[in-house]
Amino acid sequence: MGIHLKSIIVQAKQILKLQSHLLTRNLSSDVPKGHLAVYVGESQRKRFVVPVSVLNHPSFQDLLLQAEEEFGFHHPMGGLTIPCNEQAFLELTSQLVNVS
């Protein structure tokens, strides 16, 4: 399990590095520093911007595990895609952000 979580964290860091690169090129200026854009939904996917601090929470790491199981390192939207019900994602992230 520890090795599996390490791969998820490495994947998230790779995405953050890519987004950081895009920010410097002004291609993704709507993602503030310290945040990550993710795509959420089961069939229709909606883009959300969340603080990177949520990456450390076990509940969010469960979502990252689901994403890895479904998409591996290939995310169809070009960014981190989380195969989760939008309402469940909103409830989870609002709890995590309020706790931080």
Image (cartoon, rainbow, N blue to C red):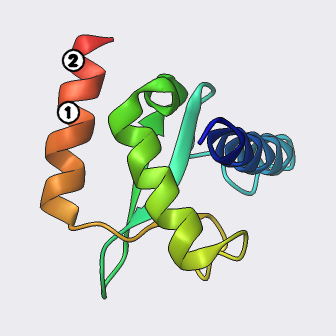
The image quadrant of residue 17 is: top right
Compared to residue 13, the image places residue 80 above or below, namely below
* Quarter of the image where the C terminus is located: top left
* Amino acid, disc 2: Asn
Residue 34 lies in quadrant: top right
Q: Is label 2 in contact with label 1 (beta carbons under 8 Å)?
A: yes
Closest to the observer, 47 or 92 = 92
How crowded is the residue under tag 2: few (<14 C-alpha within 10 Å), some, or many (20+)?
few
Q: Secondary structure at mark 2?
A: helix
Task: Give the image location of residue 4, x and y in percent.
Answer: 66, 48
Q: Residues within 10 Å of mark 1 (few under 14, many from 20)?
A: few
How many circles with numbers are drawn on the protein? Answer: 2
Residue 88 against residue 71 in the figure, above or below: above
Q: Amino acid at mark 1?
A: Ser
Kindly identify which residue carries mark 2: 98
Left or right of residue 37, residue 27 in this image: right
Cα separation between marks 2 and 1: 6 Å
Residue behind mark 1 = 94
Is the residue 90 above or below the residue 50 in the image?
below
Query: Horizontal and vertical percent for residue 36?
Result: 56, 42
Q: Residue furthest bottom?
A: 43
Q: Which quadrant of the figure contains the N terminus?
A: top right
Residue at image location 53% in from the left, 51% down from the top: 37
Give the residue drawn at x 50%, y 25%. 56
Q: Residue at x 20, y 48 (%)?
A: 90
Query: What's the residue at 39%, 31% (across, down)?
Result: 58
